[in-house]
Image: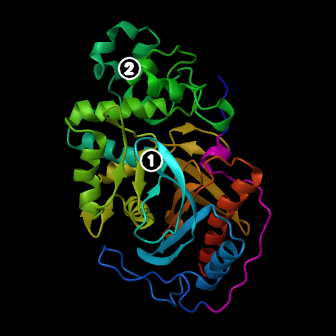
């Protein structure tokens, strides 16, 4: 089974070549200086020496001058402090008035919720870690069909080898066509799964094409299984369990997590403020802590952000987290990432003590230019950080 390439879909790459765009530091003034708010974020001083704000302002001013409607926000934290925050107006997918979504022009600011798309998957992993720590889920080696006794008729010798870990590492070994523009609106398994009466039955009923755990193959259907498992194990839908046990302890009060047929859309239905997106990254960087409080077990953070399987485009995959590397000025930097369609990216760089969150609206644009723009913003952030490292 061949691995499908998802560089453009997720906006993440390892050492992808990009056209270098020069950044020149200039007077920073108050450009990008975050406003102090009562939300738990300490604010870095405008002249903080740990990041070149002038370089970040040059990057942000260029985005604004180019009138690129697809970059919506760039936020950076370094040393546990919010160091840079800039928003741009543009078109976004927002919840429809009745169902689905619609495209609308949005003037983004620090209070605007933004679609996380597949960043939702990595955040769902954090909820799994909490549930395992509390004994609600036995562990990653639990046989998958133990959670689905009603689907006993789907069991085969190959599928009996499925474990919770195969859900978390995208290595189910089941035939799956992920939804992309090339597959059309309905000619893909994601659409067929959502139209099926029982989504979990649809996913587990797919034919086996490889032994579980052998090969990475991106599969949003795995998150449907995960969402159902959390509901069965905890007695709460994922969105409620995450609200009470992850978001509330973090001080996140305005999250929205859509449901599909009663279960939470763990694969891509979360909407967060970018500040809260960055907050989750900072917690992961701190080993599961936020403001001194342990929110997610440190052991789960370490396990889920350790490479488990070779993924695509030179990256590895943990438990629903990407592990990649980027070269800046002959220095190779390793990052932990939550990546979503359209250019949503949350990247954590422990060696720089840095977290970067970018939101964007390239939902249907898979061109090289779209990829270079969204990934180039991340590289600009790294250049601003390493200029003073």
* Residue toward you, 273 or 335: 273
Mark 2: secondary structure:
loop
The location of residue 235, given as percent across then percent down, is 19, 35
Mark 1: secondary structure:
loop
Crowd tier of the residue under label 1, counting other residues whose Cα lies within 10 Å: few below 14, some 14–19, many 20 or above: few
The location of residue 279, given as percent across then percent down, is 39, 65
In-image side of 86 versus 279 (left or right):
right
Q: Quadrant of the C terminus?
A: bottom right
Segment colored magenta: 6-27
Q: Which residue is mark 1?
A: 96
Snapshot quadrant of residue 196: top left
Sequence order check, earlier mark of 1 and 2: 1
* Residue toward you, 111 or 293: 111
Q: Residue at x 20, y 42 (%)?
A: 134
Q: Is residue 272 above or below residue 200?
A: below
Q: Is residue 295 visible?
A: no
Q: Residue furthest front?
A: 97
Snapshot quadrant of residue 198: top left
Label 1, label 2: how far apart the Cα atoms are = 23 Å
The location of residue 85, given as percent across then percent down, is 50, 75
Q: Nearer the viewer, mark 1 or mark 2?
A: 1
The disc label shown at residue 197, or none: 2
Q: Is residue 296 above or below residue 41?
A: above
């Amino acid at each position: 089974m061949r691995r499908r390439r998802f560089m453009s879909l997720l906006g993440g790459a390892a050492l992808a070549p990009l056209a270098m765009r020069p950044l020149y530091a200039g007077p920073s003034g108050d450009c990008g200086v975050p406003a102090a708010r009562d939300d738990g974020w300490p604010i870095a001083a405008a002249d903080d020496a740990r990041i070149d704000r002038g370089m970040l302002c040059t990057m942000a001013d260029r985005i604004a001058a180019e009138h690129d409607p697809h970059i919506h926000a760039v936020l950076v934290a370094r040393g546990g402090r919010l160091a840079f925050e800039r928003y741009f107006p543009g078109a976004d997918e927002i919840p429809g008035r009745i169902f689905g979504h619609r495209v609308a022009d949005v003037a983004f600011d620090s209070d605007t919720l933004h679609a996380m798309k597949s960043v939702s998957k990595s955040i769902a992993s954090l909820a799994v870690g909490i549930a395992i720590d509390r004994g609600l889920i036995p562990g990653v080696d639990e046989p998958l069909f133990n959670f689905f006794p009603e689907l006993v008729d789907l069991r085969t010798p190959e599928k009996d080898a499925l474990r919770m870990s195969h859900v978390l590492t995208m290595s189910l070994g089941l035939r799956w066509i992920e939804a992309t523009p090339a597959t059309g609106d309905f000619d893909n398994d994601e659409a067929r799964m959502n139209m099926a009466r029982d989504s979990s039955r649809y996913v587990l009923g797919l034919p086996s094409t490889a032994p579980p755990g052998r090969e990475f193959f991106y599969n949003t259907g795995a998150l449907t299984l995960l969402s159902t498992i959390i509901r069965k194990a905890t007695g709460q839908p994922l969105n409620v369990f995450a609200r009470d046990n992850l978001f509330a302890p973090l001080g996140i009060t305005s999250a929205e997590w859509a449901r599909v047929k009663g279960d939470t859309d763990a694969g891509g239905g979360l909407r967060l403020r970018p500040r809260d997106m960055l907050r989750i990254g900072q917690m992961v960087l701190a080993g599961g802590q936020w403001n001194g409080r342990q929110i997610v077990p440190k052991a789960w953070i370490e396990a889920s952000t350790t490479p488990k399987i070779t993924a695509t485009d030179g990256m590895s995959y943990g438990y629903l987290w990407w592990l990649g590397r980027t070269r800046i000025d002959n220095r190779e930097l390793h990052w932990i990432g939550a990546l979503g369609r359209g250019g949503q990216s949350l990247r954590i760089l422990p060696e720089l003590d840095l977290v970067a969150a970018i939101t964007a609206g390239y939902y249907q644009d898979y061109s090289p230019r779209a990829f270079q723009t969204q990934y180039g913003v991340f590289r600009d952030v790294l250049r601003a950080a390493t200029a003073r490292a």
